Image (spheres, grey):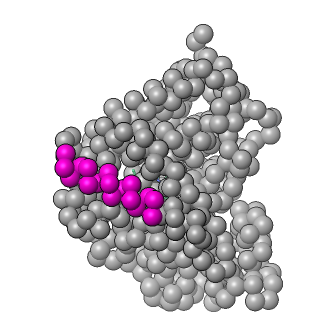
Amino acid sequence: MKPPSPPSLPLIGHIPAFRRDVLGLIIRSVREYGDVIRFKLGPHPIYLVNHPDAILHVLKKNAVNYDKDTRSTRFLRDIASESLLTSNGEAWRQRRQHLQPAFHRQAISGFESIMREEAEVLVRSWKNQSQVNASADLTTTTFSIVARSLFGSDVARSTLASLAAPIAQVLTEAFTRLGSLTGRKSRRFVSAMSQLNAVVDSVIAARTQAPDSPDLLELIRLGNPDPRAVHDESVSFLLAGHETTANALSWLLAYLAHHPDEQARCAQDPAALDRAFQESLRLSPPIWIIERHALGPDEISGYTIPQNASVAICTYTVHRHPDFWDAPDTFQPDRFLQPVPAAFIPFGLGPRVCIGKEFALMEARIIAGALLENFQFTPMSSTFPEAETGITLRIKNDLHLILKPRRP
Ligand code: HEM
């Protein structure tokens, strides 16, 4: 049996509705048609699954039937080529097995000093400002953290800046291409990619000549010394490891700026801050959609999933599923005092769960903790910011905040 499909236009199907307001479309559709829906993006059907049991089936129990040979991964492959983020099958398994130990909770404590230093740099730069573009500054901070963890803590600031600029450019361009019909690479994309590749190669070459303290790069090299593979894996970590965390932190600050009582509580109590971060990841998950490609036919909740189908999981709507969350649209961090429902998957699930989860959680705790210790945040506008669905879920037009010192 085919899953239900909301009304759509001939030939182009749901493309215009997706472009207009993809989150609104999915939210309305699951409310009206249930937890398995068939959308049509032109000739390509997409099967959306929204129930935690079905998600567990796709991402974990029957994960062997689903890989990441998807449209969005193909675009990422133009940037990060074959890497942990983009590979499949045995090639992926070997990479994951090799890199996993570096991301265990104990292992990442080696990166704590980098996170603390960068948090301090951010606090210092905010101390002489009364208004900030928090999204932009947090992107710089999280980028510096992942790049220094990867290439060594002594990477020069100028090198970080010359890596950050093309990375930002290729991310923006990749998303524009994802939304276009042809998916053609723009001249700007090609030029940003060659700039990025050149800087990454020169940083890697410099480390070959002078390796010192162990960093992620050394570990990547041990797994696969082929220079091309080392290059691609490095780019994939730069890509996967900063925008997500920057967005997660921006959303957290947005929620706290609009909930001053919670903000005051989080400034006093790290456990309250952890709960607020979870609640912010629930309402505004940076990876708002997870996509898979079905290697063979399957059945999900009684519906047929054909071979080669695209299957999508929208974490944003799963996290607001009314069967699993009371007052799903309201910011209530204390709901995380209760056991966490299965309908909470900000870092994914199963074998391809985010490898950087503990890294991101530690980073968020350190940065948000340092910011709350030093500042009180007030929003520039009483309206809560809107979400923008890019490769990650960004704050539309960035998060601008008014700062006051917490302890004058
Ligand atoms: C709040 C921050 C973050 C969020 C919300 C997040 C979310 C996710 C999600 C949902 C996935 C799974 C995607 C899928 O199943 O298709 C994923 C995968 C991944 N993440 Fe993260 N991530 C975050 C931070 C990080 C960091 C800091 C790093 C690296 C330092 C990282 C590296 C990766 C990599 C390499 C993968 C692919 C893993 C694989 O396929 O084996 N992430 N992330």
Q: Which residue is depicted at the point 67% across and 88% down?
A: 43
Q: Indicate the position of residue 150 as horizontal and vertical percent values.
A: 33, 48
- Residue 270 in view (yes/no): no
Task: Determine the main secondary structure of the stretch shown in magenta.
Answer: helix
Figure check: 288 above or below 313: above
Task: Name the image quarter holding the N terminus.
Answer: bottom right
Residue that lies at the very extreme toward the top in this rendered image:
408
Question: Which region is colored magenta?
Answer: 194-211
Ligand 1: give its quadrant. Answer: bottom left
Look at 54% across and 76% down and name the residue there.
Answer: 71
| Quadrant of res 212 | top left
Residue 40 location (% of width, % of height) = 69, 82
Residue at (42% x, 54% y) in the render: 238
Q: Residue at x 63, y 85 (%)?
A: 44
For the question of whether residue 365 can be seen, the reply is: yes
Residue nearest the observer in this picture, 209 or 35: 209
Check residue 136 for magenta coloring: no
- Percent from the top left, x then y, of residue 174? 57, 66
Above or below residue 44? Residue 75 is above
